[in-house]
Amino acid sequence: MQVPQSETLIDSEAGLDALCEQLRGQPVLALDTEFLRERTYYAQLCLIQVAAEGVVACVDPLAVDLDPLLDIIYDPQVVKVMHSARQDLEILFDLRGELPRPLFDTQIAATLLGFGDQVGYANLVQQMLGVELDKMHTRTDWSRRPLEAEQLRYAADDVRYLFSIYHRQVEALAAKGRSRWLDEDFAQLTDVNAYAPAEDDLWKRVRGSQKLKGAQLAVLRELARWREQRARDSNRPRRWILKDEVMVDLARRRPGDIAGLEKIRGLEASIVRRHGEALLTLIDAAQKSDPAGWPTRPAGKRLTPAQDALVDLLMAVLRSHGAAQDVSPALLAGRKDLEALVRGETDRPVLHGWRGELVGHALQSVLRGESVLRVVDGRLRIEAG
């Protein structure tokens, strides 16, 4: 496994053609991006970093047509290695409307190797390779040109060491018999439905929506649709169109005239002037629509004190098994999963596959009263009842 210490800046079509020639046929490609998103709806891609056997390069998307490189990135025969891949995948989804597969996320893999939950890239590099990364360019404006040598070095390090970490993690997972454990997690990460939510579900992402019900949710749904379309068309952040708290207040109060709109705190005068009538029409139509079509939230029953205590007990079992196996408990299940088990639900990931074998069956055994918990030498032990 040879990865160069120096990196190449690709800012010409000829350079990109030469890079792609080096990358074709490579089985593994480490990948990262630098981007800006503070002032736009769509992320502005400013740099793509790639590493493979004998190759480390930074590709300037502001200078070249990325299609030849994207063809390689989307090749299903190439494993794409990323760390905390979600935001990078969002950018790739915007570029082609699909996601590259197969994927290997080193942050997720680290949770199966005793590095805890959501370990940062620099921390992982230090722990696995003993290398301290320079953090000086964390807040760099990557859209400005020319890029300095130090900036390129910083960006290239994100894939130079990522390539090495991938190979070490693959070996470590194989040694533990966990090579295939994360296949389902990686498949979920590349599910396009997670990156293109249905317009009818946009309201669920609005902070504060849980305060609303009935006609209020119907109004919020239409406001969320309207905001999303405006943000896309103008390529501006959603919050620049309407902030979440403003949308919730509009849905809660449902003003019927311009004077009512003007009383909504945080609703900018320019929005009222340009779109006030459209918003009033939207609000009126939504609240007069058929109640059968209004959004609803699942009715969640509150746990009794006894059930809540049982969830705490299951959480102790979860953490104990995670610690014993060097697996982050957060990767096994969350508290909501355990609450569902206490309510009698059985279709939860923690009960299936490797999670079921590692801890799910033990949780069910405790719930059925077939196991008991004891403290021995300061450690929690689960024994047959």
Image (tube, helix red, strand yellow):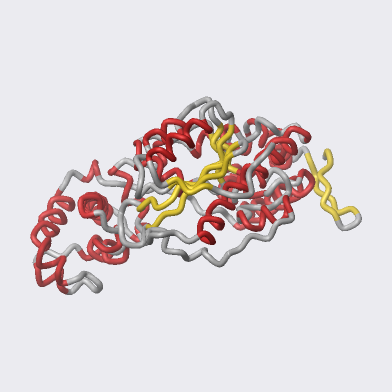
Answer whether residue 75 is visible to the viewer in this image: yes
Q: Quadrant of the N terminus?
A: top right
Front residue of 1 and 232: 1
Q: Looking at this rendering, what residue extends furthest in the right direction?
A: 377
Horizontal arrangement in the rendering, residue 122 relative to residue 274 (left or right): right
284 left or right of 86 in image: left
Location of residue 34 with respect to 347 vertically, above or below: below
Question: Which sits in the foreground, 142 or 257?
Answer: 142
Residue at 35 percent of width and 56 percent of height = 206
Which quarter of the figure has residue 356? top right
Q: Is residue 341 left or right of residue 34?
A: right
* Direction from residue 203 to residue 60 in the image, left or right: right
In the picture as drawn, the residue positioned furthest to the front comes out as 14
Which residue is at 64% across, 42% downward?
3
Residue 292 vertical placement versus 255 (above, below): above
Residue 181 horizontal/vertical position (percent): 65, 33
Picture residue at 41% right of the left edge, 45% below the top: 90
* Most foreground residue, 174 or 122: 122
Q: Residue at x 84, y 42 (%)?
A: 383
Quadrant of the rendered image containing residue 65: top left
- Residue 286: image location, x then y, percent: 17, 51
